[in-house]
Amino acid sequence: MNTDTVSIKVFKVVNIAFLIIISAIMVFPYINVLANALNDGLDAARGGITLYPRVPTFENFRVLLSNSNIAKAAGISVSRLLLGTAFALIVQFSCAYVFTKKTLKWKNVLLIYLMIPMYFGGGLIPVYILYAKIHLLNNFLVYVLPVSFSLYNMVIIRTYLYTIPESLEESAKLDGANDMVVMLRIILPLSKPILATVGLWTAVSHWNDWTTTLYFVPTNSGLYTLQYILMKVLKESESITKLMQEASQNNLSISTNARKTVTPDTVKAAQIIITSLPIILVYPFLQKYFIKGVTLGAVKE
């Protein structure tokens, strides 16, 4: 038997085993939290729950979903994700397309100018004062406008656009198309992989962010995001107790015995699942675009 063939087989076996171990280490904590979220609270307090609930129940999720603040915060988070991601892709793709033009004057100077904020910033206080001056505090637009442009994402998109043959654009212009038509009808459809990749990065960033709410939405509770409420619940034991009391008062369908079996720890676990599950479900649908978008343009022939 060829030595190289044996080495390749050994490498594949070791590689697969290593990836399985790494995957198990990464997935186990999430499955453990899910098992606690689906378990009776008093029973979970005994410990020993690993991969599946010992006394299954949905009361922990019902307590959360019956609270109006959670539903409102989820709506704000979803709205922020959709609008913020869409607007960011429009801004970054348009900017990347412009920077692929050879006729753009002072291109390098503009890139250096845009690169400066990546390394130097004024800090939180100047940003807070600026947002106050332009009326972004306690405003939904504070979730969308300040993060609509990322030089890193723009450069990634621009690098991908360089892989699209210039002959396509030239032939379109010979047929009478202008730059806007070329961008929307030729370049944009061919850029789906990289837009899906950057869109996924942007969406995850929007979904996980809670510091924007903490710093710039201090008094408007109607604009609190789901992640910010989760942060407060995880840090303040009184918040979870109040949440359970409100759920008990507002939702009469929750039986008295069930309320007694719901504990702060299991409700925390349920809220972690509710907060993280939507963005996890997005990954399988964008995986093929994600892989293609990252690898295309990485090798120049």
Image: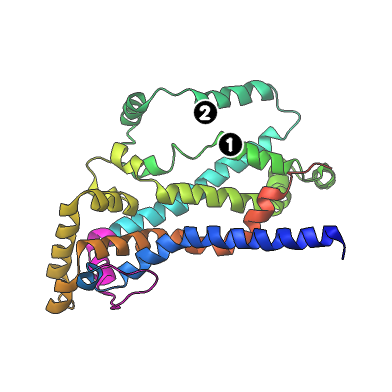
108 and 41: which is toward the camera: 41
Q: Residue at x 27, y 52 (%)?
A: 229
Give the percent coordinates (x, y) of residue 120: 48, 22
Give the percent coordinates (x, y) of residue 73: 30, 56
Q: Secondary structure at mark 2?
A: helix
Name which quarter of the figure residue 79 lies in: bottom left
Q: CA distance from mark 1 to mark 2?
A: 9 Å
Q: Which residues are magenta?
A: 47-70
Q: Which mark is residue 208?
A: none
Neighbor class of circle 2 (other Cα within 10 Å; few <14, some 14-19, many 20+) is few
102 and 71: which is toward the camera: 71
Left-right relation of 190 to 199:
right
CB contact under 8 Å: marks 1 and 2: yes
**Can you see residue 138?**
no
Which kind of residue does numbered mark 1 sit on?
Answer: Tyr
230 and 85: which is toward the camera: 230
Residue 191 in magenta stretch: no
Give the percent coordinates (x, y) of residue 274: 36, 63
Left-right relation of 219 to 157:
left
Q: Residue at x 47, y 51 (%)?
A: 204
The quadrant of the rendering that contains the C terminus is top right
Tell me the residue that label 1 is attached to: 152
Image height of 154 relative to 66, above or below: above
Left-right relation of 9 to 96:
right
Tell me the residue that label 2 is attached to: 118
Which kind of residue does numbered mark 2 sit on?
Answer: Met
Residue 67 in magenta stretch: yes
